[in-house]
Image (tube, rainbow, N blue to C red):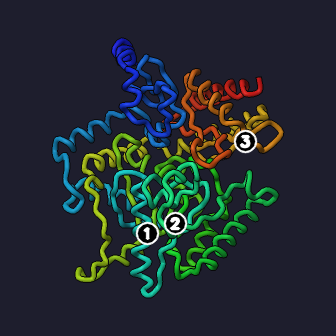
Amino acid sequence: MGQTVGTTQQSAALTDDDLDTLWRPLTQHALRKRPLTIVEGHRCTVVDSDGKEYFDGIAGLWCVNVGYGQERLVEAAAAQMSRLPFTPLSRPAPVSIELARKLREILPGDLNHILFVNTGSEANEAALKIARQYARQKHAGQNRSKIIARYRGYHGWTFGANSATGQAGRKVAFEPLVPGFVHVRPPDLFRLLEGLSPSQAARELARELDQVIEFEGPESVAAFIGEPIIGGGGVLVPPDEYWPLIREVCDKHGVLLIHDEIITGFGRTGAMFCSEHWGATPDIICMAKGISSGYVPLAAVGVTDEVFGGFLGDPADRVHFTQISTYGGHPVACAVALENIALIEELGLVANAAEMGARLLDGARELQRRHPVVGDVRGKGLLCGLELVEPGTKEPLAAPTVDGLVQEAQARGLLVGRNSGTVPRLESLLMLAPPLVVEADEVDHVLGIVDDVLATASA
């Protein structure tokens, strides 16, 4: 990919002071550890400042769906920036309207109304606010403010989204958080529902949600929020009956269903949106990451006709949604997203994610058969998790050992994810989610490196 001399000079120029000048997330700066500095990328490969190449097995942060170096996205950004670099969504650019129209076309059900924001956290934050305001206006005289979420789920870093998050490691330092959030068990068949069939587990979890709504009082509950597949909290794939049953419980009590598709949207799981696998369309859907493949910040919230209708009325009644975002629906971001979705469709990346995902999961399950340190393999499409355990037990593999495996993979030229900083002790999952442009030989290459790395765990 060239530029080796220049990038090496960049690496040499990084001083000790630079290590603290940029405050990096999830990093203990007292360790004085130099970061892996990435300077360029192409398809599924990124290059560091020393010129070393890595296969990006986690697509940035689950987001570079179309791969690196897609010039069409660069051209779309440049053309829009030249034409109109900014206008607020209150007086939108045509491209923002066009993107909203495109999302309405590809979203399931009657999710026909689109609100743009900037990040996944903001999308979930907006969805929670929509749910609360809608519930108060729809159910006059009731106090439908509570949000039910799930342990191990992650919904973002803003205060509302963080309150919905069910990971102590991502929230305890900021408590007390926003009141009115209740959590229920996640669909963790490996640890929480041992001895039950998937169908039995689904019914048990639906019963639990029904009971919690009854205990809290249906007249106090606005919404239930969940990732269709819990991502960073453990790649927890629900039984097939789970979401249809959850949908029934929500309908029974007049509770809105919010799907957080920040990770799972735009082809990641082998469907354009993960909820399509189970035919359980939410009332509100949250999108980010793959909407622009990470090329520019953009996120969106889609709502049904019913939810949107709850905000219609006389201007004097002030029932409109009372939120505004300076950069939400930024014309440059919308132009990139439109071209990104076109690439996903033209390149057949949803089908490729299904095909290559099956290859990846089959290979990961073969690794499980060969390496006792792999306790469980979970996933759908190009979203795969290998839960590492002490051999012969379900005891999570020690964090230093897992860290060592991640570093070993990096040394061998593979970047993998790990669910660190989530739930204490339950942080032994290696995660694979490559760009959706990945090909068969690249999947095999990734599996080969993971095979070699796992072998070191028992050496």
> Residue at left 68%, top 59%?
239
**Amino acid type indicated by mark 1:** Asp
**Amino acid type indicated by mark 2:** Thr
Give neighbour class at mark 3: few <14, some 14-19, many 20+ (Cα, 10 Å): many
Residue contact between numbered discs 1 and 2, judged by CB atoms under 8 Å: yes
For label 1, the residue is 110
Tell me residue 143's x, y (percent).
Answer: 47, 81
Task: Locate residue 458: give its quadrant.
Answer: top right
Which circle, 2 or 3, is nearer the viewer? 3
Q: What element carries label 2?
A: loop
For label 3, the residue is 396
Q: What element carries label 1?
A: loop
Q: Residue furthest bottom?
A: 141
Give neighbour class at mark 1: few <14, some 14-19, many 20+ (Cα, 10 Å): some
Q: Is mark 3 on a helix, strand or loop?
A: loop
For label 2, the residue is 281
Observer-nearest of 77 and 393: 393
**Residue 260 visible in the snapshot:** no
In the drawing, does residue 353 fall left or right of residue 190?
A: left
In the drawing, does residue 396 fall left or right of residue 73?
A: right
Tell me residue 347's x, y (percent).
Answer: 44, 41
